[in-house]
Amino acid sequence: MEWVIANMAPLMFGALVVFLLFGYPVAFALAANGIVFGLIGIELGLLQPVLFQALPERIFGIMANDTLLAIPFFTFMGLILERSGMAEDLLDTIGQLFGPLRGGLAYAVIFVGALLAATTGVVAASVISMGLISLPIMLRYGYDKRLAAGVIAASGTLAQIIPPSLVLIIMADQLGKSVGDMYEGAMIPGLVLSGLYVGYVALLSIIKPASCPALPPEARSLRGFKLALRVLTTLVPPLVLIFLVLGTIFLGIATPTEGGAMGAAGALVLAVVRRRLSWKLMKQAMETTGKLSAFVVFILVGSTVFGLVFRAVDGDLWVEHLLLSLPGGQVGFLIVVNILVFLLAFFLDFFELSFIIVPLLAPVADKLGIDLIWFGVLLAVNMQTSFMHPPFGFALFYLRSVAPASIKTTDIYWGAIPFVCIQIIMVALILVFPGLVSYGDPASRTQIEQSGEAGGGADLDALMRGSEARGSDTQDSNADLLKNLQGDK
């Protein structure tokens, strides 16, 4: 029994892994592990029964979290836009614009993928829309099957890193940071990643021009003034919506939750203007939004139960000791963490990684002096691969569901591999050039960086500590309460 008491934290984590590998729902696997090991700890005298009295307050805290309101708003906005025909108009118009170029249709898919990411933030909507509309056209005009499948799946996953991404909202919540700062920090990496996709297609158009031919003249129905007018009328509404959502957040006019609400209202207005709004569309969008929101809240409740007991048995200290003992300091920690997240992404999606892994890594990163906004963006780029990993990547499944029979599953998998490699390169670029993640007031950050260099390692996270002092004090008091509830060991 002494061995069980001494190793409660690793046993608890190992049991969770076993549950997940057997395919149990994540929310229930987390909650069941927390409750069972909590009861075992009470029986062994390791914990006090009063520990579970902290659960109702924790769960009520989830329900009262204003930040999480942004999730249903942005999800609803994305679903309304996806069903209102915006993706079809964008792909058709941008395809005509880039048509004369080799790889023009692929460029159009990447451009529209980035634009959809900045307006919808939902991977499934982007991949399915582009798979239904662009894939048949690309195949008709002689595009390589693997390239066509890969570029559509990869462009759809841009919704994971380009604001208003759902994963960034959850990441900010788990790290205890501002969603607005997380959005601002992720903007440049998202655009650079889009540029890397364009560069890969451009390189392929030179090396293997037959794999991505230009559109033939008869397929380019719009030219001159008509094309310019079509581009203007098609691009202006989504760009206005992007400013309405992201611009107001970055300028400090609106919170992310308020920005999401404005985006949802704007999406409804666009749907009305396009005469696509119907009761059926509203019902579908609200039903899907409700399901996704409930899914997130259930996982949050489960992770709260697990985290409460895991912390009470000193699981946080076990993880901290494990990671701080790695050789290489910050660099060694970042390399190991990124390899770990990349491998876990083969089996877990970004929700599971965000709720299970990130809370364990964040305290260690903070103790090592790593800026948590930068760390969150780095993990978000890495976790993006969870949608692209063969054989379990969700983006690949979405594309498979709408791809014609002529596209084999192996074509989709092989097509995804180059883009997974590009995503890994993006992770390396953020590690080598940390300035790619930029947020807050540049003058203040420069001053903090200089003082950090002079004083031996202050991190950029100091920018946020003033505004979040009350939240951190609350977390510290909660931590002290949990430690008091553990009892004598």
Image: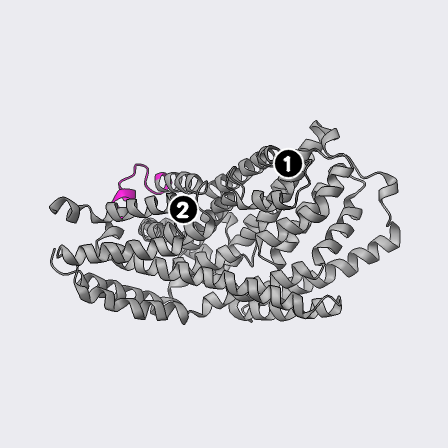
Residue type highlighted by circle 2: Gly
Q: Residue 237: percent from the left, percent from the top?
A: 72, 63
- Horizontally, is 478 left or right of 47 in the view? right
Q: Is residue 48 magenta?
A: no
Seen in the picture, residue 80 relative to 389 is either above or below; the reply is below
Q: Is mark 1 on a helix, strand or loop?
A: helix
Residue stretch rendered in magenta on the structure: 320-332
Residue pictured at 25% horizontal, 55% vertical: 36
Question: In terms of depth relative to the viewer, which is nearer, 32 or 134?
Answer: 32
Circle 1 packing at 10 Å, graded few (<14), some (14-19), many (20+), is: some
Q: Is residue 425 above or below residue 243?
A: above
Q: Is the magenta stretch mostly helix, strand or loop?
A: helix
Q: Disc 1 residue type? A: Tyr
Label 2: element kind: loop
Q: Is residue 326 magenta?
A: yes
Q: Which mark is residue 23?
A: 2
Image point 41% across, 56% down: which residue? 448
Query: What's the CA distance linking mark 2 and mark 1?
Result: 36 Å
Q: Which colour scheme is used?
A: one colour
Residue identifier under label 1: 200
In terms of depth relative to the viewer, which is nearer, 359 or 432? Answer: 359
Q: Is residue 358 visible?
A: yes
Whole-percent x and y of residue 203? Answer: 67, 32
